[in-house]
Image: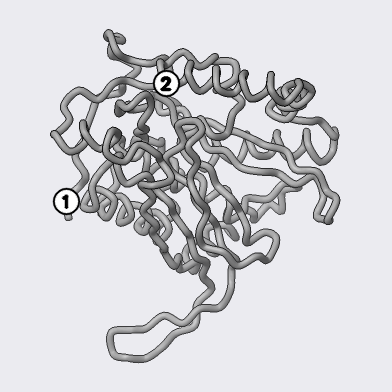
Amino acid sequence: MSAQPKESKDNKKKKRRRGDRYDGRLVRDLDTMHVLIPFLIPRRTDNEAVLNEIIDLTAVEAYLEKKNEGDPEFKYTFFHVICAAIAKTIALRPKMNRFYAGDRLYERDDITLSFVVKKKFSDDGEEVLAIVSVDKESDASPVEQIYQQVKKIVYSVRHANESDKTTDTMNIFIKLPRPILKLAMKFLRWLDYHGWYPKSFAKIDPYFSTVFISNLGSIKMRANYHHLTNWGTNSIFVVVGEKKPTPFYNEDGTVTMKSALELGITIDERIADGYYFANSIRILRRLFAEPELLDLPLMTQVEY
């Protein structure tokens, strides 16, 4: 296929209009189905589409070997590449950055990725919620943006033993009596329905991010699905599987064993159609096949 066309100008350059939220712009050119669907099937968890991709890591392994040639203390990993590839795909395919809230469809300005960091790999090791953002305007590559932020988070969690703001906020809420807590959560849902959910909360809530990523491969757990939630605005959940030798079939019928992992992608199918999802996956495949593309600025177009 030819180079992907630029589907929309950077939303940051557009003035907000009536009906927009602070975290997204109202999509106004909808067809009848997408206007009605939140009333017909209102819950995000009832609109899950599950995509599974087996990722050949041959090119990624070579790329990481080159990135880590100087033997840095904090190494570049598969997780950094996966996050960067997802972020770039979403940047080039803006419908993937949409969400339904208040029975309306919105498109985000920002690209944010959330994940869990375990302080230590043990049964009683605490988990910390982390959120990183990717700047569309930055000249820094998506890999470098992700790497620097993750490095800072991991150091603060595992070495400085710091907690995260999300957990600190939840610790305040759980001290409330159950009837008051239930009422408070109902009020927050009402605020979100009208686009008034506090920015300070949304900024630290992983369920208000573009993508929630679970790196289950890092704990040797085999799973390829995670549900979405009806809380927040998160429309995409990605499960990263375990790296392992995997058979790949060649055109001549022979089989080659390659290092690979599985991505389980759960999407709110209301944000786009199957054709759009398929072309987005093609970009993702291209980025894993040629990870050097992730060293270019985020908005650099990719042929697929």
* Residue that label 2 marks: 193
Tag 2 secondary structure: helix
Depth check: give the residue in front, 84 or 44: 44
Hey, what amino acid is under mark 2?
Answer: Tyr
Q: Which residue is drawn at 28% across and 33% down?
A: 39
Hey, what amino acid is under mark 1?
Answer: Ser
Colour scheme of the rendered structure: one colour
* Residue that label 1 marks: 2
Q: Could you tell me which quadrant the C terminus lies in?
A: bottom left
Image coords of residue 205 (percent x, y) = 59, 29
Q: Could you tell me which quadrant the N terminus lies in?
A: bottom left
- Crowding at mark 1 (Cα within 10 Å: few <14, some 14-19, many 20+): few
Q: Which residue is drawn at 59% across and 23% down?
A: 185
**Is any atom of residue 256 visible in this view?**
yes
Q: Which residue is drawn at 38% across and 27% down?
A: 101
Image coords of residue 268 (percent x, y) = 37, 44
Based on the displayed image, in which of its 4 quarters is residue 164 positioned? top right
Image coords of residue 249 (percent x, y) = 37, 83
Using residue 41 as the reference point, say whether residue 125 is left or right of it.
right
Could you tell which of marks 2 and 1 lies nearer the N-terminus? 1
| Outermost front residue | 179
- Crowding at mark 2 (Cα within 10 Å: few <14, some 14-19, many 20+): some
Image coords of residue 78 (percent x, y) = 58, 56
Using residue 270 as the reference point, say whether residue 59 is left or right of it.
right
Using residue 210 as the reference point, say whether residue 123 is left or right of it.
right
